[in-house]
Amino acid sequence: MTQQLVLYPLLLQLFLSIILMFSWKRISWQRVISILGGILNLGVSIWLFAYIWENGTQTIQAGNWEAPFGITFVADTLAVTLVLLTSISGVAVSAFSASSIIPARLKFGYFPIFHFLLLGLIGAFLTGDIFNLYVWFEIIIISSFVLITLGGEKAQLEGAVKYFTLNILASMIFLTAIAVLYGLTGSLNMADLSIKVAAIENRGLVEITAILFLVAFGIKAAVFPLYFWLPASYHTPPSAVSAIFGGLLTKVGVYALIRVFTLIFVGDVFMQDTILVMAILTLISGGLGALIQTNLRKVFSYLIICHIGYMIIGLGMYTEVAIAGTIFYLIHDIVVKTNLFMVGGLIYRIKGTNNIKSLGGLYAEYPRLSLLIAIPLFSLVGIPPLSGFWPKLSLLNAGFNDQNWWAMGAILFASLITLVIIAKVWSNVVWKDKVELPKRINFRYFENLNKTRKIQLVAPIVFLSLISLYIGFGAEHVQQLSTRVAGELMDNQQYIDAVFKTGQNLKP
Amino acid sequence: MRTIILKTASAYLLPVLLLFSVFILLRGHYLPGGGFVGGLMASIAFVLHAFANGLSNTKTLIRFHPGFLMPVGLALAFLSGMAPLMFDLPFMTGLWYPEAIPVIGSLGSALFFDIGVYLVVIGVTLTIIFTIADTI
């Protein structure tokens, strides 16, 4: 049973997509299948996580081909943590979509595609083969193209063109980088690459390949000079789609960066400095961008960019404490960002607009809901003891150990700017007096929804807020997890041994 | 584009092309071919038929919406991948029936995966082409 456990979340998502495709026209079934499947997937992911936590890294050779030749799936602690977070966000967004996505969109296969996207995400986290990683990236971007254009509104298509162009470009660069790497080493297995790249004499060529990977994943993760597609496109699709994009899509880029630069291109001082500079500029420019926006979802989009900086900066410093901070931030950020975009969607449902200037009076109308919204907003800033505080502490600690004043300055500056922005959002949306808005016709306002739909909108936000609170108040556990992941990432040998474990191949 | 020559020819070409696509599908394991190419050929057969006889005739010929082939094909491919799990082997391991079968050759789970691909490709291609042809 447990022998194939690594692949179960992956296979379950594929199974769900197929089942959902069979019930293409029956939207009410799709809603139920998607939510129940999401809960089941959460259960499987927790099982996998618990198993890996107890027994250490597990691998499986797809098709029973031996390690450097076949495709290996590796479940180390980082991968299963991200799979778990994907499942958590996935089930929340499933429930949120069931209520917030209009039937016209659902009729064109929203749910099957959504589960294909989750399949791609889980696959990208679990694979141990760099070309296979590319394939999962393709699945992710193809599904995301469909999700971003589904509905075919003019603004959506405009955003989609920018999104499409830059992501295709990133994929091409990624593919070129893989080709060069394959030319250098003759291998695609990441564990094998780790050994072979270290042995290459011509370091210049290795460095160029590393830069190609950096650019490719940098576009996907939206770091400093390559982020402009993100704020241009993330606010256009329905908020459930933005939630999964904002929560997970850019994080796959970060994950790929972490994986590649801790496993394959290790100990290159020049690359580390480049990443560090990019991270500092990302922190500053993303924060400044968010300051001037008035559309709630655009504010959140810029905050995504700003906070990607926190994750990259730990990778740039490259010490165990810094990587632990990065991982902690990743865990916190996936939950909070997914939640924030859903909050944006909820506010849109209540008021009919996302413009900060015309919003207001939420506290007077929905006091309990406002308190709920406060949790993700202030977790994002990291007001102690909420979840954003602890990873920043780790990162500052790492910066202090390195005497890296620039990095520390950028981290503090970005925190301050986030605080300003969130304070602005809070006072404008929740505290300000109500602005009278003209009632939109043909718009399903929150107050007119039936009870099930209301629960489907609010329950995911409650669920993710509780997890955020857990990350904040149970920081000790998450810190323990992050430290363990950082330990595994700094010590490649563990990963390599797990992949090349003798007697791994199963005989019939 | 409705010429009598094409119309007559397409009546014969449809079965021949479909047979050829199955041939391509079956030889694909060791030789050039396989589910993807076979699927494309099969959909070309239907597209040719639509050219000659009009889209609505082709639709009545197929009887069901071609999009339905997508989940069927995916399910078949998925099940062929899952089959080894029953023997405690990793996902997608090739299972082979020990003796060769006449005409088809060796029978294994890889063949069912390929048939799945074949169906998905037909489903996707025809859905795309029919949708575009409908809107023009």
Image (spheres, rainbow, N blue to C red):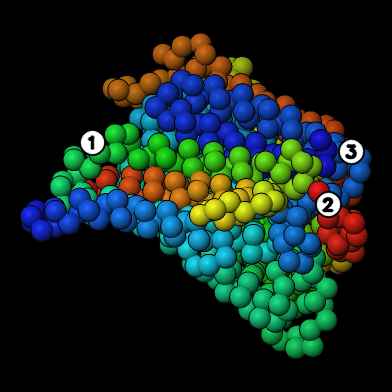
Camera-side residue of A288 and A40: A40
Mark before the other along the chain sequence, 2 or 3: 3
Question: Of all residues shown, which one is farthest toward the front?
Answer: B102
Residues flagged by tags 1 and 2 on a common chain: no
Viewer can see residue A397: no
- Determine the CA span between mark 1 and mark 2: 49 Å
Q: Is residue A143 above or below residue A132?
A: above
- Chain of the residue on which disc 1 is drawn: B
Residue A382 placement (x, y as % from top left)? 73, 41
Q: Quadrant of residue A202?
A: bottom right
Question: Which dot, 3 or 1, sits closer to the camera?
Answer: 1
Disc number at residue A227? none
Which one is nearer the viewer's eye here, A186 or A181? Answer: A186
Q: Which residue is mark 1?
A: B60
Q: Secondary structure at mark 2?
A: loop
Q: Which residue is mark 3?
A: A476
**Residue name at image x 49 percent, y 26 percent:** A30
Q: Nearer the viewer, mark 2 or mark 3?
A: 2
Label 3: element kind: helix
Q: Is residue A207 above or below residue A44?
A: below
Q: Amino acid at mark 3?
A: Glu
Q: Residue at x 50, y 31 (%)?
A: A20
Other-residue count near label 1 (Cα within 10 Å), few / some / many at <14 / 14–19 / ≥20: few
Parent chain of label 2: A
Instruction: Tell me which amino acid carries mark 2.
Output: Lys
Q: Chain of mark 3?
A: A
Give amino acid for label 1.
Thr
Q: Name the residue tied to disc 2.
A: A507
The lab-note entry on whether marks 3 and 1 share a chain reads no
